[in-house]
Image: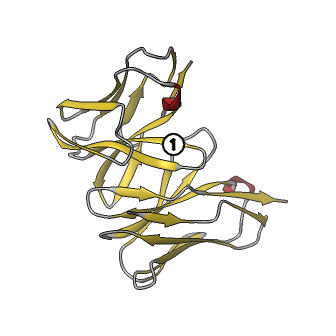
Amino acid sequence: DAGITQSPRHKVTETGTPVTLRCHQTENHRYMYWYRQDPGHGLRLIHYSYGVKDTDKGEVSDGYSVSRSKTEDFLLTLESATSSQTSVYFCAISPGNTIYFGEGSWLTVV
Amino acid sequence: GQNIDQPTEMTATEGAIVQINCTYQTSGFNGLFWYQQHAGEAPTFLSYNVLDGLEEKGRFSSFLSRSKGYSYLLLKELQMKDSASYLCAADTGNQFYFGTGTSLTVIP
């Protein structure tokens, strides 16, 4: 158990509404990541953080923002959800030579 | 750009051996991960290769050739529960780039 929890686990929302996904870790690791996983694309990095208030973009960051005000929490926000953001979102931490994933958040934008 | 390639699907028989290949081209490279992912679940860590050669861990082994940009995951004595997607990922430093995954089906 890597001590990562994601919330909500499942959400259905309407196009144009804001959505925030939360990732919480109990291990005090510096690096945290948000990925999305889609058929035919695999896991793609959205944003990552290397410390409190230190974040950077990944390969599919458009339409997403993140915040990290505490070591243990990394928030992913969709400012105005679109149907193309329907996906499974995984948070991850990296304590060294491995990556541990949270259980995933299934988001459907209708 | 970063490019990670692996076969989309493979089928193998229970009790047999299967090799899943992964080739990579990345700007920067520290090591190569393999993950297993069952449908509807999160990926779980299998191995991380930094040096060239074969690393064995029970029924699973992973090989890396840095000069060829090539890795493989070897699964021995296949069991039905090994039916899953297998993801390779390149560690380029502070980011990890994943392949699209190989869906392995184990048949009786």
Position of B24 relative to B35 (above/below) = below
Q: Is residue A70 above or below residue B95?
A: above
Q: What residue is drawn where x is 46% and y is 35%?
A: A89
Q: Secondary structure at mark 1?
A: strand
Image coordinates of residue B91 in percent, x first then y, are 35, 63
How many numbered circles are shown? 1
Residue located 36% across and 80% down the image: B51
- Residue linked to disc 1: A37
- Horizontally, is B82 left or right of A64 in the view? right
- Quarter location, residue A52: top left
- Give the quadrant of residue B5: bottom right
Residue A74 in view of the camera? no
Amino acid, disc 1: Gln
On the image, the x and y values in percent for residue B15 come to 77, 68
- Compared across the picture, whether A15 is left or right of B15 comes to left
- Disc 1 is attached to a residue of which chain? A
Indicate the position of residue A92 as horizontal and vertical percent values.
37, 43
